[in-house]
Image (spheres, rainbow, N blue to C red):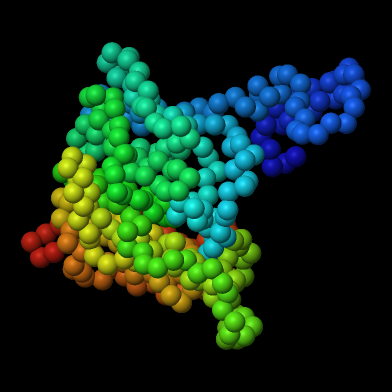
Amino acid sequence: MHGFSKGKRILFFSILGIFQYSGLCGQPTSPSSGYHHPPAPIPEILDAPPLPSVLPSPDCEYLLIEGRLANPPVGDLRVPILHLAGLRINPSNNGRFVTVRNTSLTLLDIHSGKKTPIALPSGSLPGFPQWSPDGRYFVFTNTRKKSVELWVGDARTGTAHVIPGIQVNGVFEPSVQWMSDSHTVLVDAVSGKSGTPPTTEDNQGPVVEESDGRPSPAVTFEDLLTTPRDERLFEFYATSQLELVNIKDHHVVLVGKPAMFTHIDRSPDGKHILTVAIHRPFSYVLPYTRFPRQVEIWNTEGKLEFVLAHTPLQDQIPIGRRRGRAPKLPVGAWSLSNTGVGRST
């Protein structure tokens, strides 16, 4: 068991010993239908809630505490899943297939110690929250069966509500980001879609794959595209429309044209938006992280200011310790000047 830490090995052998002890001391039972439950304390050990996620406000006045389930229910296996371009997409709500279940949000006043549970509808799966720059509000996505909602909370009142009419595209994360004014959020929304997802396969002959003869590193990935229908499905669910949403009056402004945005970032002054969007041609042997992509700088009206980078299909990356992963874009700082905006590494 070389891949296990000392603590995990101790836990494994402790549970194994309990199983063996219960098998020796337990009474024989007749076969029955349904799930069998192990004796105590095995359920208590396996279902013990994980440590919560904690996010302090920028002014250090509040903490947001997010509770989680240790194990998702078996019923989650009934959820329809699309395996596309290295992702597992839930077509019912246009989001990721959820494997980590966040179940609750609690607001803690650091000075008084008062805890205020955030009221959510039954069956809600809140995403990780984000504080506004001034520390007054927080936003989070709420995954439901048929959609991914946008919620906003007020730290002073300890309440939160859904912003009606906004359906977040949860395929790429994070899909919500605060602007610098603390009352506007930039959202990857589903509103830019048109038509319905493809339901039948093309009958235009067999799927043909060919090699151009270049030697190339090969790594095994899962959940890849396999047919032209997969391509169209991925493009349908991955495409989103950027929207600026005012959390106070719920006014929505469309920003630019729909695209497959994998990353968005606003400048510190809130006047510019960096977008990273993937595009065709896709690959049947690589995940979306290696697809061609365009990096651009927009203004808040969605007008192109300049193209920062264009990356072709990344199929020649050496296999090393990173196990063939595509390198991430350089992470740097926004630089503003009288002649324009840039991003320096």
Figure quadrant of residue 248: top left
Compared across the picture, whether 181 is left or right of 224 comes to: left
In this orientation, does residue 246 appear?
yes
- Residue 271 in percent (x, y) is at 15, 55
Tell me: residue 137, above or below residue 258: above
Residue drawn at (45%, 51%), measured in percent from left and top? Answer: 93
Tell me: residue 102, above or below residue 243: above
Compared across the picture, whether 87 is left or right of 46 comes to: left
Compared across the picture, whether 314 is left or right of 265 comes to: right
Q: Of 279 and 149, which appears nearest the observer? A: 149
Q: Pick out the residue farthest to the left.
A: 338
- Residue 54 in percent (x, y) is at 40, 30
Numbered circles on residues, count:
0
Residue drawn at (27%, 15%), measured in percent from left and top? Answer: 111
Q: Of 71 and 194, which appears nearest the observer? A: 194
Residue drawn at (68%, 38%), measured in percent from left and top? Answer: 4
